[in-house]
């Protein structure tokens, strides 16, 4: 692959995924400036590794998953380096069991679709769960692609998605908001 | 299937990630269980809320232009690096044309014997330009090190969970090579470990990843854009070393690293 050919193919296959890349970095870091820095760095890393990317035009999704894996790893490195700058790393154990705090499913009347409430709820979701949800719901990656991107087994992906969504659902339940004391308090 | 199982399988069912028999079991359970039906409805509402385009983050208007420019700069740099490392001798020392012609003659004569090794060389050139680009990128502020430490017991564990192999991080300080840290990089289609050493403010990037051929060989050497690049295959790892340190000292470093 000549350098011109490499650039052409990179711009054709990888560059179109700039917005998903930014969206992921933004949801992981919760900072606009950092997300842009991370995405630019990730694009340079992706470009220098591009010769080894074996995708094809028939499977554009692969290119996106490949890029998002690099964006995710670049974001994690950034988050760990800036741990003290307010970016809080939460691990699996940190997710409270919402069953203790919110009503049983049959008591939930309605879940909120208010965009700001959804945004706040997702922002408060611990990082491990948030990344799985963003990769699945917003970027449409398959479980297998997520498992590769995050570097955890398929079963862990399933469990994080399931627990993350369950938590969000309960946090956003109308019943929870009406009964703040025993309701879906955000810790 | 009972409700507890259904709740575990429901998300994967809605994501269309279950196999046929599990899918059927969830469907059967849903048909008979109002609670789970309601859970399913809520999941669907939540899903459409999360897929709302307005929930997404959007970069600045000129961001894609900026990234495009940065990538094109990197492409230019890489093309220059590749060009100069391959053709330097043609441009500056015409006398070597003779040598080149002789080599060419030899190649055509020996023919097929050399095909495999020349293929290998071209792949090596690709990796060489990739590690050189990685080294140059690492010299930009804040790009050199993900885990800054002179303690090998800090650097080595840092790679756990980030790589599918555990890179050796020898302490060479007694020989005058200071460990300054490590980072992740991407070369040849995989995440690789980079261990960074220093001597007199010269940074040395050691790129390494598992050597699947498992054949040890001699140290391969090249100079490009003023940087020295050394490469060899160890018994377990493939090594690429890049630095602006002079050739003799870098070779000494490579031997120290190799002997460890």
Image (spheres, coloured by chain):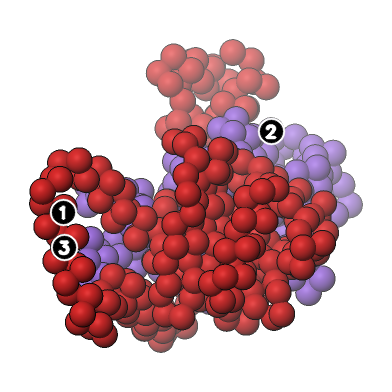
* Residue drawn at the location 76% of the way across and 48% of the way down: B157
In the rendered image, the vertical position of residue B178 relative to residue B32, given as above or below: below
Quadrant position of residue A13: bottom left
Disc 1 target residue:
B106
Q: Give the residue displayed 81% in from the left and 47% down from the top.
A: A94
Question: Is residue B79 among what the camera can see?
Answer: no
Q: How far apart are marks 1 and 2 (CA)?
A: 82 Å
Label 2: chain letter: A
Disc 3 to disc 1: CB gap under 8 Å: yes
Where disc 2 sits, the SS reads: helix
Chain B appears what colour? Answer: red
Between B209 and A168, the one lying in front of the other is: B209
Q: How crowded is the residue under tag 3: few (<14 C-alpha within 10 Å), some, or many (20+)?
A: few
Local secondary structure at mark 3: helix
Q: Are marks 2 and 3 on the same chain?
A: no
In the picture, the disc for residue A106 is: 2
Image position of A94 (left or right of B12):
right
The answer to which image quadrant residue B95 occupies is bottom left
Image coords of residue A45 (percent x, y): 47, 66
* Residue B102 tag number: 3
Residue A101 point in image, percent of width and height: 83, 43
């Amino acid at each position: 692959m000549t350098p011109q050919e490499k650039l052409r193919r990179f711009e054709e296959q990888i560059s179109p995924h700039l917005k998903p890349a930014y969206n992921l970095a933004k949801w992981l870091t919760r900072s606009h400036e950092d997300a842009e820095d991370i995405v630019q760095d990730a694009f340079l890393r992706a470009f220098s590794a591009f010769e080894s990317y074996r995708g094809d035009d028939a499977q554009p999704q692969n290119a996106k998953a490949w890029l998002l894996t690099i964006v995710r790893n670049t974001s994690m490195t950034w988050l760990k380096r800036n741990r003290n700058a307010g970016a809080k790393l939460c691990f699996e154990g940190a997710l409270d069991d919402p069953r203790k705090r919110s009503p049983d499913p049959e008591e939930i009347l309605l879940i909120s679709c208010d965009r700001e409430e959804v945004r706040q709820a997702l922002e408060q979701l611990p990082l491990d769960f948030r990344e799985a949800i963003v990769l699945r719901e917003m970027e449409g990656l398959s479980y297998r692609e997520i498992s590769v991107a995050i570097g955890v087994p398929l079963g862990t992906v399933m469990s994080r998605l399931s627990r993350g969504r369950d938590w969000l659902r309960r946090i956003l339940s109308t019943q929870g908001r009406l009964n703040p004391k025993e309701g879906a308090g955000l810790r | 299937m009972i409700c507890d199982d259904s709740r575990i399988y429901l998300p994967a069912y809605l994501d269309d990630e279950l196999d046929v028999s599990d899918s059927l079991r969830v469907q059967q359970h849903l048909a008979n269980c109002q609670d789970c039906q309601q859970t399913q409805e809520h999941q669907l509402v939540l899903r459409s809320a999360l897929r709302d385009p307005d929930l997404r983050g959007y970069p600045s208007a000129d961001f894609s232009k900026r990234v495009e420019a940065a990538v094109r700069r990197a492409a230019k740099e890489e093309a220059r690096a590749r060009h100069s490392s391959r053709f330097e001798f043609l441009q500056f020392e015409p006398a070597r044309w003779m040598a080149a012609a002789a080599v060419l003659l030899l190649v055509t004569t020996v023919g097929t014997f050399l095909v495999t090794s020349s293929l290998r060389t071209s792949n090596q050139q690709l990796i060489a330009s990739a590690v050189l680009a990685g080294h140059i990128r690492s010299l930009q502020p804040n790009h050199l090190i993900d885990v800054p430490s002179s303690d090998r017991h800090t650097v080595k564990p840092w790679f756990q969970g980030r790589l599918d192999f555990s890179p050796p991080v020898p302490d060479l300080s007694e020989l005058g090579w200071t460990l300054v840290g490590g980072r992740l990089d991407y070369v040849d289609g995989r995440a690789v470990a980079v261990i960074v050493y220093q001597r007199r403010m010269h940074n040395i990037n050691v790129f390494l990843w598992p050597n699947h051929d498992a054949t040890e060989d001699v140290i391969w050497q090249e100079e490009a854009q003023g940087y020295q690049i050394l490469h060899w295959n160890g018994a377990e790892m493939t090594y690429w070393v890049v630095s602006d340190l002079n050739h003799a000292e870098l070779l000494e470093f490579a031997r120290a690293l190799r002997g460890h």
